[in-house]
Image (spheres, grey):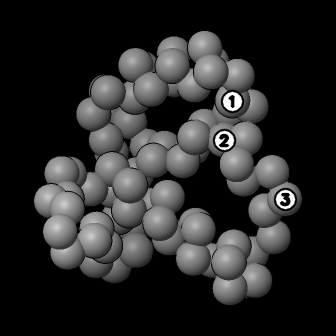
Amino acid sequence: MAPADLRKEGSAYDLTLAVGILVASGQIKADEVDRYIIMGEMSLDGGLQPIKGALSIAIKAKEEGFKGFFFRFRM
């Protein structure tokens, strides 16, 4: 879903884009969606796949003042 002139690196933003589309189209209500970090790779069947770097993302989210985060991580 990246613009044609920008190379897409990884798929960690699949869930972010999907949530953005659902919010913009009115399919879900998310008044404070901008206060959360949302990252995740989605499989073709809509399932959520784990992403790497979840701990680093969580630490940065806290430093930046985000309310919380949504992602699936690998153990």
User: Tag 2: Cα neighbours inside 10 Å, few (<14), some, or many (≥20)?
Assistant: some
Q: SS for tag 2?
A: strand
Q: Amino acid at mark 3?
A: Asp
Mark 1 and mark 2 residues within 8 Å of each other at the beta carbon: yes
Residue 35 in the image: state x and y as whole percent.
73, 41
- In primary-sequence order, the first of circles 1 and 3 is 3
Residue 13 in the image: state x and y as whole percent.
38, 55
Q: Kindly give the residue lying farthest to the front in the view shown.
A: 5
* Residue 37 in the image: above or below residue 5: above
**Is residue 49 among the parts visible in the rendering?**
no
Q: Amino acid at mark 2?
A: Tyr
Tell me the quarter of the image containing the C terminus. Answer: top left
Residue 54 in the image: state x and y as whole percent.
40, 28
Mark 2 and mark 3 residues within 8 Å of each other at the beta carbon: no
* Residue 52 in the image: above or below residue 14: above
| Residue 47 lies in quadrant | bottom left
Q: SS for tag 3?
A: loop
Per the model, the C-alpha gap separating discs 1 and 3 is: 14 Å
Q: SS for tag 1?
A: loop
Q: Which residue in the protein does label 1 denote?
A: 66
Per the model, the C-alpha gap separating discs 1 and 2 is: 6 Å
Per the model, the C-alpha gap separating discs 2 and 3 is: 11 Å
User: Is 47 on the left or on the right of 34, as rendered?
Assistant: left
Tell me the quarter of the image containing the N terminus. Answer: bottom left
Residue 36, disc = 2
User: Is 64 on the left or on the right of 18, as rendered?
Assistant: right
- In primary-sequence order, the first of circles 1 and 2 is 2
* Residue 65 in the image: above or below residue 21: above
Q: Amino acid at mark 1?
A: Phe
Q: Which residue in the protein does label 3 denote?
A: 31
Residue 63 in the image: state x and y as whole percent.
60, 14
- In primary-sequence order, the first of circles 2 and 3 is 3
